[in-house]
């Protein structure tokens, strides 16, 4: 059974600070990693994807991947109240040839940015 | 945004009745998925499709069936709804040729009384 673990939070950060969200996964064969943002009552929205070790930056968001440690993180710089949401980590094994391209999701971390 | 719509958006039904949820996409994506989301469990895969008439089970498929007769439509059927199937249901699509990213529809909130 593949597992994706996230701290459920809530994680509270002041406006303008860096929010750090963490995720660990159990399947060493995992190759693709995603962060989704979900506002209350809405559907998950893809904000970052990362496929290789290291950092990937997109605006205020940076995804970090360490496959040896089976760890992926999301940093949000200059956090805004509008960033308050639940962040879902998702993992799949697309490159391993499994063929089903299934995502396994963590339960999410609730982020609250305090003005 | 993969142009995904779901219908109905909200439904209340009684235990024992059949229910069909529809997912429609306009992007010609090969893969389509049905998830349910419940507090404490997160998103869990019910069924998925990898082409017209090609479907397979996910983690929580008991009590659900699916059909895909056209690329753009993926139907989820609860043959006899139970209270444990009260949930929010999301459809997602994915096209392997362009990326490995799944995009979600707006969701259907189903209440079984």
Image (tube, rainbow, N blue to C red):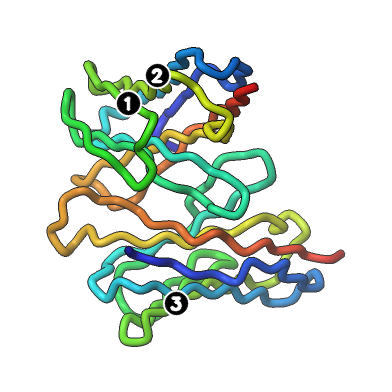
**Percent coordinates x, y for residue A67 in the rendering:** 32, 80
Crowd around label 1: few <14 · some 14–19 · many ≥20 (10 Å): some
- For label 1, the SS is strand
Kindly check if marks 2 and 1 are in contact, taking CB atoms under 8 A apart as contact.
Answer: yes
**In this figure, which residue is indicated by the disc labeled 2?**
B79
Q: Secondary structure at mark 2?
A: loop
Residue picked out by circle 3: A64
Spatial CA distance of label 3 from label 1 is: 38 Å
Identify the residue at horizontal 39%, vertical 38% (top origin): B92
> Which numbered dot is residue A114?
none
Q: CA distance from mark 2 to mark 1?
A: 8 Å
Give the residue displayed 65% in from the left and 22% down from the top: B113
Residue that sits furthest to the left in the current view: A97
Displayed quadrant of residue A13: bottom right
Q: Chain of mark 1?
A: B
Q: Nearer the viewer, mark 3 or mark 1?
A: 1
Q: Position of residue A12 (x, y in %)?
A: 77, 70
Measured from the top left, where is residue A94 in percent x and y? 22, 58
To which chain does the residue with label 2 belong? Answer: B
Mark 3, residues whose alpha carbon is within 10 Å: few (<14), some, or many (≥20)?
Answer: many
Q: Nearest the camera: B52 or B12?
A: B12
Q: Quadrant of residue B2?
A: top left
Badge 3 marks a residue whose secondary structure is: strand
Residue B73, position as x, y percentages in the image? 32, 20
């Amino acid at each position: 059974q593949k597992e994706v673990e996230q701290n459920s939070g809530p994680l509270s950060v002041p406006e303008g600070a860096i929010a750090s969200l963490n995720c660990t996964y159990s399947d060493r064969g995992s190759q693709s990693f995603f962060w989704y943002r979900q506002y209350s009552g809405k559907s998950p929205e893809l904000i970052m994807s990362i496929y290789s070790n290291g950092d990937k930056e997109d605006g205020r968001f940076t995804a970090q991947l360490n496959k040896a440690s089976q760890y992926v993180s999301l940093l949000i710089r200059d956090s805004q109240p509008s960033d308050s949401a639940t962040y879902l980590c998702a993992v799949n094994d697309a490159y391993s040839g499994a063929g089903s391209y299934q995502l396994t999701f963590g339960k999410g971390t609730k982020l609250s940015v305090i003005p | 945004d993969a142009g995904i719509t779901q219908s109905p958006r909200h439904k209340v039904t009684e235990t024992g009745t059949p229910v069909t949820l529809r997912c429609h996409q306009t992007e010609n994506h090969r893969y389509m998925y049905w998830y349910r989301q419940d507090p404490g469990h997160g998103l869990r895969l019910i069924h998925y499709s990898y082409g017209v008439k090609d479907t397979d089970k996910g983690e929580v498929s008991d009590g659900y069936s699916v059909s895909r007769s056209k690329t753009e439509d993926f139907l989820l059927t609860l043959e006899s709804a139970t209270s444990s199937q009260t949930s929010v249901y999301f459809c997602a699509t994915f096209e392997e040729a362009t990326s490995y990213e799944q995009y979600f529809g707006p969701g259907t909130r189903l209440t079984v009384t």
